[in-house]
Image: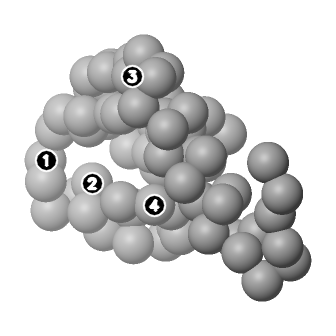
Amino acid sequence: MLIFSKDIMEFEHKCRKVWLLNMKITRVAVDAMGGDNAPSEIVKGVVKAIQDKDNIKVLLVGREDVIKEELSKYQYDK
């Protein structure tokens, strides 16, 4: 396949979509309120995990207002 430089971004985007569709998505539920230093350390770890892996979806369980406040400290794909 011949790809021109102006089309490279679109091509990469399409390839990524196909790759993601073929990947198995891992779904995880995490107790955000459990453990020492919760929810800050729990949320920090979850955000790092979803930034590092494209095939993971995380459900944070706990007090929504507290979790949302902690999540607001980070940038991540929602």
Q: Amino acid at mark 1?
A: Arg
| Mark before the other along the chain sequence, 2 or 4 | 2
Query: Measuring 13% from the left and 53% from the top, which residue is drawn there?
Result: 64
Please give left or right for residue 29 compared with residue 5 in the image. Answer: left
Q: Amino acid at mark 3?
A: Ile
Mark 2 vs mark 3, foreground winner is 3
Q: Amino acid at mark 4?
A: Asp
Disc 3 residue crowd, few under 14, some 14–19, many 20+, Cα 10 Å: few
Disc 4 residue crowd, few under 14, some 14–19, many 20+, Cα 10 Å: few
| Quadrant position of residue 35 | top left
What is the CA distance from the residue labelled 1 to the residue labelled 3? 25 Å
What is the CA distance from the residue labelled 2 to the residue labelled 4? 16 Å
Circle 3 residue: 25
Residue 67 - label: 2
Q: Are marks 3 and 4 in contact (CB under 8 Å)?
A: no
Circle 1 residue: 63
Disc 2 residue crowd, few under 14, some 14–19, many 20+, Cα 10 Å: some
